[in-house]
Image (cartoon, rainbow, N blue to C red):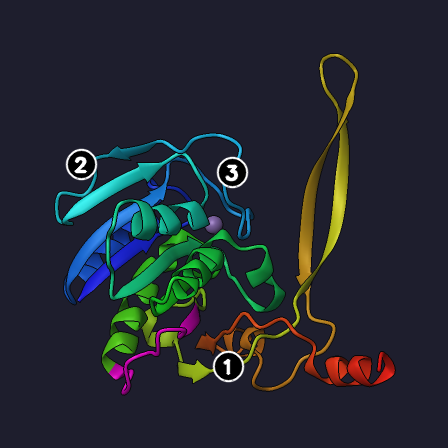
Amino acid sequence: MRFLVTNDDGIYAPGIKALAQTLNAFGEVIIIAPDQERSGVGHGITVHHPLRVEKVELFPEVRECYMVDGTPADCVKIAIQGLDIQPDMVVSGINLGANLGTDVLYSGTVSAAIEGVLLGVPSLAISVCKNISYLPTATYFLTRLLFELKTPLPKDGLLNVNVPALRQDEVKGILATKLGVRLYKNEFVKRLDPQGKAYYWMKGVPYAPASESDHDHVAIEQGYVSVTPIQFDLTYHALFSELRDSLQ
Ligand code: MN
């Protein structure tokens, strides 16, 4: 089993180290990750300047490790299509901060995993809520999940895993969930730079306009690890039928 490991918090983030160490017990690990924090870049790719790929020795326990001055999606693309690495699975994370519901549309962590399935490799994204002190909970439940998955993931199989900010013994279990809708009440704090020009900092508090019991954020609030299967068909199928009929 060969894992291609990436993230969006950057190659120096503690989450990717914990992830690589965990996956080492299951097979060969190759890391390819951004050289800096790229959280929130979504599925962005680099098309207007060249990409630099540097082989580094940051993690002696893994087979190879590369640092890229691009996005998480760039990392997965160039690994598979540029460096000819052929992984059995792409694993992205462990992100510091939840990727629940509509977060997946902004998340570089999840986008790296989506890029994996676009290239025909089963993929998994994993995030831990709130802070770094719960990384051991995430690695414990990732290990359990890899053992407990009874059937191998299909080639377009993408799992989005979120781990609550709890100690391992406080977690109630692992639940299969659906993506909820998680929006943000954003506020833009306006400040002035030394030249007197205005600039803005965005901050936001998440809220869920409507919740169902099998939504991912509900599982997290109730103390479960949430595992959501994701596909990237964004077609609004019901509206498609109506549209087709009205355009006939
Ligand atoms: Mn991140």
Mark 2 surroundings: few (<14), some (14-19) or many (≥20) residues within 10 A: few
Distance in Å between CA atoms under marks 2 and 3:
27 Å
Distance in Å between CA atoms under marks 1 and 3:
35 Å
Q: Residue furthest top?
A: 195
The image position of residue 43, as x and y in percent, is: 53, 52
For residue 47, the mark is 3
Mark 1 surroundings: few (<14), some (14-19) or many (≥20) residues within 10 A: many
Distance in Å between CA atoms under marks 2 and 1:
38 Å
Q: Do the residues labelled 2 and 3 touch (CB within 8 Å)?
A: no
Residue depth check, mark 1 versus mark 3: number of the one nearer the observer: 3
Residue 162 visible at all? yes
Q: Which of 56 and 187 is in front in this view?
A: 56
Direction from residue 100 to residue 114 in the image, left or right:
left
**Residue at left 57%, top 75%?**
179
**Residue at left 47%, top 60%?**
110
For residue 101, the mark is none
| Quadrant in which the C terminus is drawn | bottom right
Q: What element carries label 3?
A: loop
Write down the residue under mark 2.
57
Q: Earlier in the sequence, mark 2 or mark 3?
A: 3
Q: Is mark 2 within 8 Å of ligand 1?
A: no
| Quadrant in which the N terminus is drawn | bottom left
